[in-house]
Amino acid sequence: MSEDLKSENNIPKIVIMEDGSYHVFGNVPLVHKTQVVSEFGEPLTWKKDKDYPAQNIEGEGFYALCRCGNSKDKPFCDGSHWESCFDGTEKADTRPTASRSMQFPRGTHILVKKDPSLCMQSGFCGFRNAGINQFVAATDDPKIRALVMAMVEHCPSGALTYRIERDEPDIEPDLPVQIAVTTEITSAGPIPGPLWVTGNIPIERSDGEPFETRNRVTLCNCGHSCHKPLCDGTHREREESALRKKNAQSK
């Protein structure tokens, strides 16, 4: 391996291959995380339940993750995108999220914003009887304000952000430089979720154009998002439907 490639491999970075996989450089730790939900199925937080062994990661500081959803060696790419003629056209906006974010009204000592283009409907922004917009309106109560902060910080895609004062920067959770393969807990049962990228890892499109580097990003790994490479939640309906069908057949 050349010295230049060795040097590149030591810098955390994700490069998207045209109609192909995610190439991950820089010895980025790869883990598995599962949603923790309430007795009513409401997502509350995440728990790490697996570290992928280093021997499963090919090359010096490099590995390739499946993007098409067809690999038989998930989360790693096995080249199935070639056989499936995967269309990985990247349609997500590369502009800064601040240009698209909308502020929730009536916040007290907190400004909460949402970028709808990043949202993948993970469910951390509400409970069965109220959503985050209602909680933001009640943030004159410090306990509700703290709850809103927790909701925002658990949002994996970073669609939700908050700050205390208008002219201050957003407050972001201290997240590790890491990629998490996720499992979501639904009413039908556990289903595979997106790749959760944390710690400000740069992501580069297949045409070389960079996305805004952010602390939290969710990447599509089912192959069906309409907002590639970002997850838009499309996997959820597909996976839940398949799981319900499987459960019905087993009865």
Image (cartoon, rainbow, N blue to C red):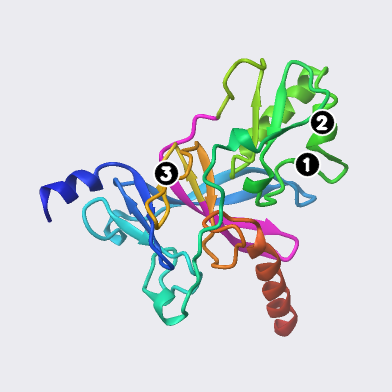
Asked if residue 201 lies left or right of residue 123, the reply is left
**Magenta range:** 173-195
Q: Which mark is first along the chain, 3 or 2?
A: 2
Q: CA distance from mark 1 to mark 3?
A: 26 Å
Q: CA distance from mark 1 to mark 2?
A: 9 Å
Q: Amino acid at mark 3?
A: Gln
Q: Residue at 62% across / 63% down in the picture?
A: 191
* Residue 13 circle label: none
Residue 147 coordinates in the image, percent (x, y): 73, 29
Q: Give the quarter of the figure containing the C terminus.
A: bottom right
Residue 232 coordinates in the image, percent (x, y): 64, 56
Q: Residue at 28% across / 41% down in the picture?
A: 11
User: Label 2: which residue?
Assistant: 135
Name the main secondary structure of what is drawn in magenta: strand
Q: Give the quarter of the figure containing the N terminus.
A: bottom left
From the viewer's perspective, is residue 134 above or below residue 222?
above
- The answer to whether residue 186 is magenta is yes
Q: Amino acid at mark 2?
A: Phe
- The answer to whether residue 169 is magenta is no
Residue 85 coordinates in the image, percent (x, y): 46, 78
Residue 36 coordinates in the image, percent (x, y): 65, 47
Which SS class for mark 2?
helix
Q: Are marks 1 and 2 in contact (CB under 8 Å)?
A: yes
Q: Residue at 85% across / 33% down in the picture?
A: 134
Which SS class for mark 1?
strand
Crowd class of label 1 (few under 14; some 14 to 19; many from 20; radius 10 Å): some
Crowd class of label 2 (few under 14; some 14 to 19; many from 20; radius 10 Å): some
User: Label 1: which residue?
Assistant: 126
User: Label 3: which residue?
Assistant: 178
